[in-house]
Amino acid sequence: MKTNFTLFIVLLVAVSLNSCIGYNSKEIFTPINANYKADCAVPPADVELVFEGESPNFKYEKVGLIEIQAEYTGKEADQLNSLKKLAKSKCCDAVIGVKKGYVTRDMGLVFTNDKNETYQAVSFSGIAVKKNKN
């Protein structure tokens, strides 16, 4: 009986935590190089950001389109760090053409009749690349 109650509480907490939408940042990665495999044994130490209008001073291989959409109370510095973290998870050591934009996102609770609220979220996007070793 005690085990069933504990399982019920754990399940209730899990459903509660997953019943919110729009309260977390959204990560989007779209591969553009079918031959690239993100299987680095050691991820890059750092990810360089090259912003729109700047020219990269290195040769590179394009890996994928990458985007981070902020959560409701997201800070831009945190979003740029999330962009780097996502690129690093794909074994990329740079993101080129980084630009800031805004997207409309919804936030609210699932399993209620309350209408979701919309908000304008900061978005950072670019092209995740792997620098050539030459």
Image: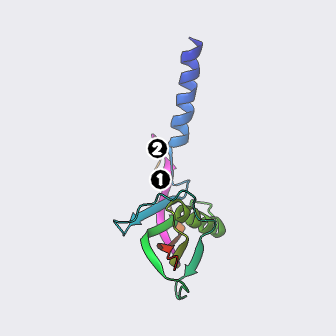
Relative placement, left or right, of 73 versus 105 is right
Q: Specify start and end residues of the magenta stretch as a single range.
A: 99-111
Residue placed most toward the observer, 89 or 18: 89
- Inspect the image, locate mark 1, and give the three-letter code of the amino acid beneath it: Asn
> Dot 1: within a 10 Å radius of its alpha carbon, few (fewer than 14), some, or many (20 or more) residues?
some
Provide residue 27's location: percent of width, then percent of height: 49, 60
Residue 69: say if magenta. Answer: no
Q: Secondary structure at mark 1?
A: loop
Question: How far from the left and from the top, in percent, is residue 123?
Answer: 52, 70
Residue drawn at (58%, 66%), measured in percent from left and top?
A: 84
Which tag is nearer the camera, tag 1 or tag 2? Answer: 2
Q: At x 48% / y 67%, what residue is drawn?
A: 67
* Dots 1, 2 in contact, CB < 8 A: no
The tag on residue 110 is: 2
Q: Depth check: 103 or 53 in front?
A: 53
User: Residue most toward the front?
Assistant: 134
Colour convention: rainbow
Q: Position of residue 53 (x, y in %)?
A: 52, 88
Q: Which residue is mark 1?
A: 116
Residue 100 visible, this orientation: no
Q: Nearer the viewer, residue 27 or 60?
A: 60
Say if the magenta span includes residue 105.
yes
